[in-house]
Amino acid sequence: MTVESGRLPADGVRRMFDRIAPVYDAMNRVMTAGLDQRWRRATVRAAVRPGDRVLDACCGTGDLAVAARRSGAGNVVGVDFSERMLERARRKAPEVEWMQADVLALPFGDASFDSAVVGFGVRNVEDLEAGIRELRRVLRQGGRLGILEITTPRGFLAPFYRLWFDRIVPLLGRVLPGGAAYTYLPASVRRFPGPEELAELLATCGFGDVEFRLFGGGIVALHVGEAK
Ligand SMILES: C[S@@+](CC[C@H](N)C(=O)[O-])C[C@H]1O[C@@H](n2cnc3c(N)ncnc32)[C@H](O)[C@@H]1O
Protein backbone atom coordinates (compact mmCIF):
# COMPACT_ATOMS: atom_id res chain seq x y z
CA MET A 1 0.00 0.00 0.00
CA THR A 2 1.63 3.23 -1.14
CA VAL A 3 0.75 6.86 -1.81
CA GLU A 4 1.49 6.27 -5.54
CA SER A 5 -0.95 3.33 -5.74
CA GLY A 6 -3.72 5.40 -4.12
CA ARG A 7 -4.06 2.80 -1.37
CA LEU A 8 -2.95 3.40 2.19
CA PRO A 9 -3.58 1.50 5.41
CA ALA A 10 -6.06 3.20 7.76
CA ASP A 11 -3.30 4.56 9.98
CA GLY A 12 -1.54 6.11 6.98
CA VAL A 13 -4.80 7.78 5.85
CA ARG A 14 -5.43 9.15 9.34
CA ARG A 15 -1.90 10.57 9.64
CA MET A 16 -2.12 12.08 6.17
CA PHE A 17 -5.32 13.96 7.07
CA ASP A 18 -3.85 15.04 10.40
CA ARG A 19 -1.02 16.66 8.41
CA ILE A 20 -3.16 18.42 5.79
CA ALA A 21 -5.88 19.60 8.21
CA PRO A 22 -4.55 23.21 8.34
CA VAL A 23 -4.87 23.65 4.55
CA TYR A 24 -7.73 21.24 3.83
CA ASP A 25 -10.58 23.76 3.47
CA ALA A 26 -8.49 26.20 1.43
CA MET A 27 -7.35 23.42 -0.93
CA ASN A 28 -10.96 22.31 -1.46
CA ARG A 29 -12.01 25.81 -2.47
CA VAL A 30 -9.01 26.23 -4.80
CA MET A 31 -9.22 22.79 -6.44
CA THR A 32 -12.97 23.05 -7.14
CA ALA A 33 -13.12 26.81 -7.83
CA GLY A 34 -15.46 27.08 -4.84
CA LEU A 35 -18.00 24.55 -6.18
CA ASP A 36 -17.44 22.01 -3.40
CA GLN A 37 -19.81 23.76 -1.01
CA ARG A 38 -22.55 23.81 -3.66
CA TRP A 39 -22.08 20.03 -4.14
CA ARG A 40 -22.29 19.47 -0.39
CA ARG A 41 -25.60 21.41 -0.25
CA ALA A 42 -26.94 19.28 -3.13
CA THR A 43 -25.95 16.14 -1.19
CA VAL A 44 -27.84 17.34 1.86
CA ARG A 45 -30.92 18.25 -0.22
CA ALA A 46 -30.93 14.78 -1.77
CA ALA A 47 -30.43 12.74 1.41
CA VAL A 48 -31.54 14.74 4.46
CA ARG A 49 -35.08 15.65 5.53
CA PRO A 50 -36.01 18.29 8.15
CA GLY A 51 -35.74 16.89 11.66
CA ASP A 52 -33.60 13.90 10.58
CA ARG A 53 -30.99 12.39 12.89
CA VAL A 54 -28.01 12.72 10.56
CA LEU A 55 -24.62 11.02 10.51
CA ASP A 56 -21.81 12.77 8.62
CA ALA A 57 -19.29 9.94 8.20
CA CYS A 58 -15.65 10.85 7.40
CA CYS A 59 -16.76 14.37 8.35
CA GLY A 60 -13.26 15.87 8.26
CA THR A 61 -13.47 19.60 8.97
CA GLY A 62 -17.25 19.27 9.07
CA ASP A 63 -18.64 21.21 6.10
CA LEU A 64 -21.25 18.58 5.22
CA ALA A 65 -22.49 18.31 8.80
CA VAL A 66 -22.76 22.10 8.95
CA ALA A 67 -24.75 22.12 5.68
CA ALA A 68 -27.07 19.44 7.13
CA ARG A 69 -27.60 21.47 10.29
CA ARG A 70 -28.38 24.60 8.26
CA SER A 71 -30.90 22.66 6.17
CA GLY A 72 -33.05 22.03 9.26
CA ALA A 73 -31.84 18.56 10.25
CA GLY A 74 -32.35 17.51 13.87
CA ASN A 75 -29.43 16.01 15.74
CA VAL A 76 -26.28 15.92 13.57
CA VAL A 77 -23.29 13.75 14.46
CA GLY A 78 -19.95 14.04 12.66
CA VAL A 79 -17.51 11.13 12.84
CA ASP A 80 -13.89 11.04 11.68
CA PHE A 81 -10.74 9.27 12.82
CA SER A 82 -8.44 12.28 12.30
CA GLU A 83 -8.30 14.35 15.48
CA ARG A 84 -6.69 17.34 13.67
CA MET A 85 -9.56 17.47 11.15
CA LEU A 86 -12.10 17.19 13.99
CA GLU A 87 -10.45 20.07 15.88
CA ARG A 88 -11.35 22.34 12.98
CA ALA A 89 -14.87 20.96 12.78
CA ARG A 90 -15.42 21.60 16.49
CA ARG A 91 -14.38 25.23 16.08
CA LYS A 92 -16.75 25.64 13.12
CA ALA A 93 -19.92 24.29 14.71
CA PRO A 94 -20.11 23.56 18.44
CA GLU A 95 -23.81 22.66 18.02
CA VAL A 96 -22.88 19.50 16.07
CA GLU A 97 -21.78 16.41 18.03
CA TRP A 98 -18.26 15.52 16.83
CA MET A 99 -16.78 12.10 17.57
CA GLN A 100 -13.48 10.45 16.84
CA ALA A 101 -14.25 6.98 15.45
CA ASP A 102 -13.57 4.64 12.55
CA VAL A 103 -16.33 4.34 9.97
CA LEU A 104 -15.62 0.61 9.87
CA ALA A 105 -16.69 0.27 13.53
CA LEU A 106 -19.24 2.99 14.24
CA PRO A 107 -20.05 3.44 17.93
CA PHE A 108 -23.83 3.49 17.34
CA GLY A 109 -26.59 0.94 17.59
CA ASP A 110 -28.48 -0.40 14.57
CA ALA A 111 -30.95 2.05 12.98
CA SER A 112 -29.68 5.06 14.97
CA PHE A 113 -29.98 7.54 12.07
CA ASP A 114 -32.55 8.70 9.51
CA SER A 115 -29.89 9.76 7.04
CA ALA A 116 -26.16 9.52 6.50
CA VAL A 117 -23.89 11.53 4.25
CA VAL A 118 -20.26 11.04 3.25
CA GLY A 119 -18.33 13.76 1.42
CA PHE A 120 -15.10 12.79 -0.36
CA GLY A 121 -14.62 10.12 2.30
CA VAL A 122 -15.50 6.61 1.08
CA ARG A 123 -12.56 6.59 -1.38
CA ASN A 124 -10.22 6.60 1.62
CA VAL A 125 -11.85 3.78 3.57
CA GLU A 126 -9.64 0.70 3.58
CA ASP A 127 -12.53 -1.74 2.98
CA LEU A 128 -15.17 0.10 0.93
CA GLU A 129 -17.80 -2.64 1.05
CA ALA A 130 -17.45 -3.07 4.82
CA GLY A 131 -17.77 0.71 5.23
CA ILE A 132 -20.98 0.86 3.21
CA ARG A 133 -22.43 -2.10 5.13
CA GLU A 134 -21.60 -0.35 8.40
CA LEU A 135 -23.40 2.79 7.19
CA ARG A 136 -26.41 0.63 6.24
CA ARG A 137 -26.40 -0.91 9.73
CA VAL A 138 -26.71 2.44 11.54
CA LEU A 139 -29.51 3.68 9.23
CA ARG A 140 -33.13 2.86 9.92
CA GLN A 141 -35.06 1.06 7.21
CA GLY A 142 -36.11 3.72 4.69
CA GLY A 143 -33.24 5.99 5.78
CA ARG A 144 -31.17 7.61 3.03
CA LEU A 145 -27.47 7.55 2.29
CA GLY A 146 -25.82 10.27 0.19
CA ILE A 147 -22.27 9.72 -1.05
CA LEU A 148 -20.40 12.59 -2.70
CA GLU A 149 -17.14 11.48 -4.26
CA ILE A 150 -14.63 12.44 -6.93
CA THR A 151 -14.84 10.32 -10.04
CA THR A 152 -13.00 10.09 -13.36
CA PRO A 153 -14.79 12.08 -16.06
CA ARG A 154 -15.35 10.79 -19.57
CA GLY A 155 -15.68 12.89 -22.68
CA PHE A 156 -14.20 16.24 -23.53
CA LEU A 157 -13.20 17.20 -19.98
CA ALA A 158 -11.07 14.09 -19.50
CA PRO A 159 -7.75 15.46 -20.91
CA PHE A 160 -8.02 18.73 -18.91
CA TYR A 161 -8.86 16.78 -15.82
CA ARG A 162 -5.85 14.50 -16.27
CA LEU A 163 -3.57 17.54 -16.70
CA TRP A 164 -4.99 19.23 -13.59
CA PHE A 165 -5.21 16.20 -11.39
CA ASP A 166 -2.21 14.12 -12.46
CA ARG A 167 0.25 16.98 -13.04
CA ILE A 168 -0.76 20.22 -11.33
CA VAL A 169 -2.27 18.87 -8.09
CA PRO A 170 0.89 16.81 -7.27
CA LEU A 171 3.00 19.92 -8.05
CA LEU A 172 0.93 21.92 -5.55
CA GLY A 173 1.72 19.18 -3.07
CA ARG A 174 5.41 19.99 -3.28
CA VAL A 175 4.86 23.43 -1.76
CA LEU A 176 2.04 22.64 0.68
CA PRO A 177 2.08 20.83 4.03
CA GLY A 178 1.26 17.11 3.76
CA GLY A 179 2.49 17.09 0.15
CA ALA A 180 2.15 13.33 -0.37
CA ALA A 181 -1.62 13.75 -0.02
CA TYR A 182 -1.69 15.43 -3.43
CA THR A 183 -0.01 12.43 -5.06
CA TYR A 184 -2.35 10.08 -3.21
CA LEU A 185 -5.47 12.06 -4.25
CA PRO A 186 -5.35 11.47 -8.05
CA ALA A 187 -4.08 7.90 -7.56
CA SER A 188 -6.92 7.05 -5.18
CA VAL A 189 -9.50 8.44 -7.64
CA ARG A 190 -8.03 6.32 -10.48
CA ARG A 191 -8.44 3.08 -8.55
CA PHE A 192 -11.89 3.92 -7.14
CA PRO A 193 -14.99 2.28 -8.76
CA GLY A 194 -16.78 4.30 -11.43
CA PRO A 195 -20.31 5.61 -10.77
CA GLU A 196 -22.15 2.57 -12.20
CA GLU A 197 -19.98 0.16 -10.21
CA LEU A 198 -20.46 2.14 -6.99
CA ALA A 199 -24.24 2.14 -7.57
CA GLU A 200 -24.12 -1.67 -7.89
CA LEU A 201 -22.10 -1.98 -4.71
CA LEU A 202 -24.67 0.13 -2.84
CA ALA A 203 -27.41 -2.21 -4.09
CA THR A 204 -25.39 -5.24 -2.95
CA CYS A 205 -24.98 -3.69 0.50
CA GLY A 206 -28.71 -3.25 1.15
CA PHE A 207 -29.71 0.00 -0.57
CA GLY A 208 -32.63 0.33 -2.98
CA ASP A 209 -33.66 3.06 -5.45
CA VAL A 210 -29.98 3.86 -5.96
CA GLU A 211 -29.43 6.81 -8.26
CA PHE A 212 -26.46 8.94 -9.11
CA ARG A 213 -25.87 12.28 -10.76
CA LEU A 214 -22.69 13.94 -11.89
CA PHE A 215 -21.48 17.44 -11.14
CA GLY A 216 -18.72 19.65 -12.48
CA GLY A 217 -18.71 18.12 -15.97
CA GLY A 218 -18.50 14.63 -14.49
CA ILE A 219 -15.64 15.07 -12.02
CA VAL A 220 -17.83 14.44 -8.98
CA ALA A 221 -20.63 11.91 -8.45
CA LEU A 222 -23.47 12.02 -5.94
CA HIS A 223 -25.03 8.63 -5.17
CA VAL A 224 -28.21 8.36 -3.16
CA GLY A 225 -29.86 5.18 -1.95
CA GLU A 226 -32.58 4.14 0.49
CA ALA A 227 -31.88 1.56 3.16
CA LYS A 228 -33.98 -1.56 2.44
C1 LIG B 1 -11.20 14.08 1.97
S1 LIG B 1 -11.66 14.18 3.66
C2 LIG B 1 -13.37 14.62 3.55
C3 LIG B 1 -13.85 15.54 4.65
C4 LIG B 1 -15.27 16.04 4.55
N1 LIG B 1 -16.23 14.97 4.57
C5 LIG B 1 -15.52 16.92 3.36
O1 LIG B 1 -16.63 16.88 2.82
O2 LIG B 1 -14.65 17.69 3.00
C6 LIG B 1 -11.75 12.49 4.10
C7 LIG B 1 -11.88 12.27 5.58
O3 LIG B 1 -12.19 10.90 5.80
C8 LIG B 1 -11.57 10.51 7.01
N2 LIG B 1 -11.52 9.04 7.02
C9 LIG B 1 -10.98 8.23 6.09
N3 LIG B 1 -11.15 6.94 6.42
C10 LIG B 1 -11.83 6.95 7.61
C11 LIG B 1 -12.30 5.92 8.46
N4 LIG B 1 -12.11 4.62 8.18
N5 LIG B 1 -12.96 6.28 9.57
C12 LIG B 1 -13.16 7.59 9.88
N6 LIG B 1 -12.73 8.61 9.12
C13 LIG B 1 -12.07 8.29 7.98
C14 LIG B 1 -10.23 11.22 7.00
O4 LIG B 1 -9.67 11.34 8.28
C15 LIG B 1 -10.62 12.57 6.38
O5 LIG B 1 -10.90 13.54 7.36
Image: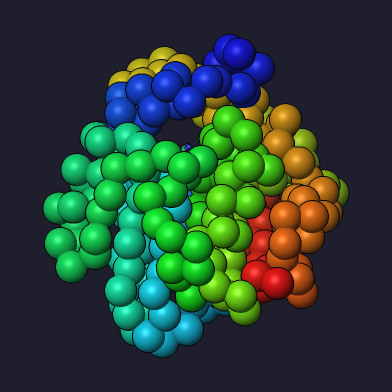
- Side of 207 relative to 168 (left or right): right
Asked if residue 160 can be seen in this view, the reply is no
Residue drawn at x 54%, y 35% is 124
- Front residue of 36/157: it is 36
Left or right of 151? Residue 107 is left
- Residue at the image position 37 percent from the left and 85 percent from the top: 51
Tell me residue 197's x, y (percent): 82, 49
Q: Quadrant of the N terminus?
A: top right
Name, please, the residue furthest toward the bottom: 50
30 w.r.t. 4: above or below: below
Q: Is residue 35 left or right of residue 22?
A: right
Describe the colour scheme in one phrase: rainbow
Ligand 1 image-quadrant field: top left
User: Would you identify the image quadrant in which residue 202 lies?
Assistant: bottom right
> Who is closer to the viewer here, 55 or 172?
55
Q: Where is residue 117? Give x, y as percent.
A: 50, 62
The residue lying toward the viewer, choosing from 211 and 170, is 211
**Residue for point 60% across, 39% down:** 123
> In the rendering, at what x and y percent does residue 144 appear?
58, 72
Q: Position of residue 137 (x, y in %)?
A: 56, 59
